[in-house]
Every structure is written in structure tokens, then in C-alpha cells.
Image (cartoon, grey):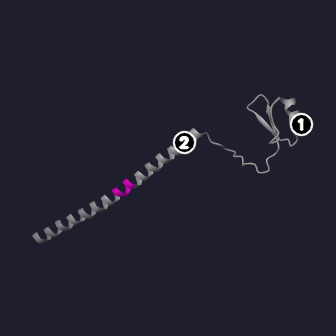
Amino acid sequence: MPYVDLSRCEEFCNSNGRCYQKNPATRSCDCDLGFTGRTCGVIDPNPAPISRFSPIPEVSAFILALSAVLFLIITLVFCLQSCCIRYSKRKSVQDSSARDIQMTTRMEIH
């Protein structure tokens, strides 16, 4: 809870916990309220935006690695698919050429 007045901040700390650090330079005090700290003091006129979701670094790294692997797999599948399509087209052209040669040969024989 932010307080502009240090005496009110100290009052809040004393009623809810122990004020263990007062900083007159920033006009703030930290209150030990039985959990990992709570600061009261001057409200920052330019506060940093608070993210509703701050991911754990390990999870972020895992997601990044997983997305890179998925990207590589998808790229590989598309490359293989295009190679197979080219090969099958080439094969069908060769087969049709071979059939044409056979038909021409049969016609010449008869």
C-alpha cells in the first residue's frame, strides 16, 4: 500500500508488521508483514508497467526451444514433400516417354 507521508507509512508498518528500513531519500519504507516484503511510500509518478503474466525463465527457454524444433520439423516436412512431388513428376514424365516409345515401336512392327 503506497503512502506519501512517512509517518503514515510507519504507522501502517507498526500496526501490521515491523518497519525494518526507512529511506528518506526515496521517502519510502519497507514493511516486514510476514511475507516477502511489501513496500509503502511515495507513489512513483512514472511507474513501470506491471505485467499480468511474468513467465518463469526456464519455461520461456523451454517454449522457445520447443518452437524452434517444431519450426525445423515443419520446414523439413515441406522440403521432403516438395522433393517427392518433383521426383514423382519426373518419374511420370519418364514413364510416359517410355510408353510413347513402346507404342511407337509396336506401331512400326505392325
- Crowding around mark 1 (Cα neighbors within 10 Å: few <14, some 14 to 19, many 20+) is few
**Identity of the residue drawn at 54% across and 43% down:** 63
Numbered label tally: 2
Is 37 part of what is drawn in magenta?
A: no
Residue 101 seen from this side: yes
Task: Tell which circle, 1 or 2, labels the residue nearer the N-terminal end.
Answer: 1
Asked whether 7 or 65 is in front, the reply is: 7
**Identity of the residue drawn at 31% across and 59% down:** 88
**Identity of the residue drawn at 76% across and 51% down:** 46
Asked whether 56 or 46 is in front, the reply is: 46
Relative side of 31 to 62, left or right: right
Relative side of 26 to 72, left or right: right
Please state which of the two labelled residues, at mark 1 or mark 2, is closer to the viewer. 1
Q: Amino acid at mark 1?
A: Ser
Q: Position of residue 1 (x, y in %)?
A: 82, 39
What residue would you read off at disc 2?
Answer: 61
Identify the main secondary structure in magenta: helix
Q: Position of residue 91 (x, y in %)?
A: 27, 60
**Identity of the residue drawn at 50% across and 44% down:** 65
* Disc 1 + disc 2, Cβ < 8 Å: no
**Above or below, 93 relative to 58:** below
Q: Position of residue 6 (x, y in %)?
A: 87, 38
What residue would you read off at disc 1?
Answer: 7
Q: Amino acid at mark 2?
A: Ala
Furthest residue toward left: 109
- Crowding around mark 2 (Cα neighbors within 10 Å: few <14, some 14 to 19, many 20+) is few
- Look at the image and give the residue range highlighted in magenta: 79-84
Q: Quadrant of the C terminus?
A: bottom left
